[in-house]
Image: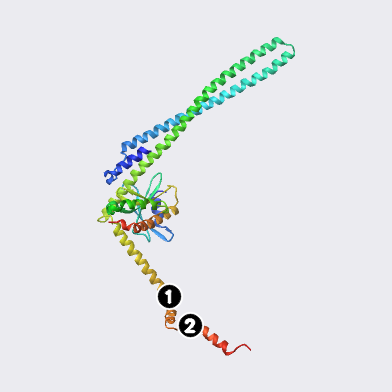
Amino acid sequence: MRSVLNKILTAMRGSVNELGEAVVDSQGNRILEQELRDSEQELKQAKQELAALMAESASLARQIRSEQDSASKREQDARKAITAGQEELAREVAERIVGHERRGAELTQTREILQQRIDSIKERVQRAEKQLADYRRELQVVKTNERVLRTTAQIDTNINSQQSSLSTAKETLERIRERQAREEDRQTASASLEKELTGADLDEKLKAAGIDGEQDAVDSVLARLKDKPAQ
Amino acid sequence: MDIQTLTLTLGDSTHAGRTFDVMPIAGEEPVLQVTVSGAEETPVYVTVTDTQILCLAYLFEEQELLPQRVNELHENMLRLSVPMPLSSLGKTGDHYVVYGALSPTSGTAEIMQELVTLAENAIDLLQTFEDYLA
C-alpha cells in the first residue's frame, strides 16, 4: 500500500496530471489486477486443499476411534476367556487386540502428520486472505485516484467550453456576497411588510409621538377607581 | 444508486427546504453537476463508482493563493477538515476541493443531506479562507 501511495504522491508533485493522466499507468494497473487474480486463485486452491485434508483427518479420527473401540471390546472378551480358563482362546483374542492397537497407533501417526499440513495450509489461507485484502485496497486507491483525475479534467473541459473560464474564487465570493445581500434585503422587506400588516408599525409611530394606547387604558382604569374609592 | 436514478430523483426532490438543479457533465465518466438552491455559487459534482459516491465542490486553484501564506492555509485546512460535518478538504490537480464520499448503498435522503451540507460548507470555507487569496 505504501508503495502505491508514494507513486501517487510522486506523480502528483509533477505536472503530469494536468490532463488527468493516469498516475499509475494502466500497465501497472493491469499488473495489480493480475496479482489480485493470482492471489484469488491461490486462495481458492488452498481452501479446496484444506477442505480435502480436513475431511481426511475426520475420517482418520473415525477409524482410530473404531480401532480403540474394537480393542477395548476384545479386552473384555479376553478377560472372560481367562476367567473361563480358556487360555488358548484368550491368546487368540490378545493377538487381535495387538492388531487393533497397532493400526490405531499407525493411524494416529498419519493423522498427526496430516494435522501439521492442515495447520500450515490454514496459515497460508490466512496470509493469502490478508494479501488479497491489501491488493484490493491498493487497487481501490489507484482506481479512485484515476477516476477523480478524469472526473475533474472532464468538469474543467466542460466548464471551459461553456464559459470563457472557470470562475475564480474571488468571483464566486462576489456572487455569494450579492446573494447574501439580496437575502438580507428580502428579510428586511418582509419584516417591515409584516409590521405594516399587523399594525405594529403604526403602534410604534404613536408611541414615538407620546401616544401610547396601552398607557392610556391603564390611566383611565386608575381614574375610574379613584372616582369610586372603596367604602 | 446510479447516476441515472440520481438524476431523476434529485430533480423532483426537496430536502430541508432546498431544491436541486441537476445537469449531466458530458464526457466519458458519468458526472453530475448539482446546484443546490440557496447555495448556487458552489455547484457540487457527483460521480458514482463501484465503491463510493463521490461528491465534490471546488474552492480555489493553487495559483489564486498568496504564495507566502499557503503553508498557513494548509495547516488551517487540515484543522478544519476534521470537525466539518460530512466533508473533508483535499486537492486534486491544481484544485482545492471540499468533498464527501458516501457508500454506494446510500439512500436519496443521505445523498441530498450530503449535497446540501457540501454546498453550504464550500461557501463557508470560501469566506473563511478569503484572506489567503491573492
User: x and y percent of residue A209 in the render?
Assistant: 42, 83
Q: Amino acid at mark 1?
A: Lys
Residue at (40, 40) in percent of width and height: A137
Q: Is residue A201 above or below residue B4?
A: below
Q: Quadrant of residue A206?
A: bottom left
User: x and y percent of residue B50 in the render?
Assistant: 40, 44
Q: Is residue B45 visible?
A: no
Q: Is residue B68 above or below residue A3?
A: below
On the image, numbered disc 1 is attached to which residue? A195
Q: Is residue A123 visible?
A: yes
Closer to the camera: disc 1 or disc 2? 2
Looking at the rendered image, the quarter that the N terminus of chain A falls into is top left
Foreground: B14 or A27? Answer: A27
Report helix, strand or loop for mark 2.
Answer: helix
Q: Is residue A210 left or right of residue A70?
A: left
Q: Quadrant of residue A69?
A: top right
User: x and y percent of residue A163 in the render?
Assistant: 26, 56
* Disc on res. A178: none
Residue at (34, 36) in percent of width and height: A30
Pointer 1: residues within 10 angstroms few (<14), some, or many (20+)? some
User: x and y percent of residue A26 in the render?
Assistant: 31, 38
Q: Amino acid at mark 2?
A: Gly
Residue at (40, 74) in percent of width and height: A192
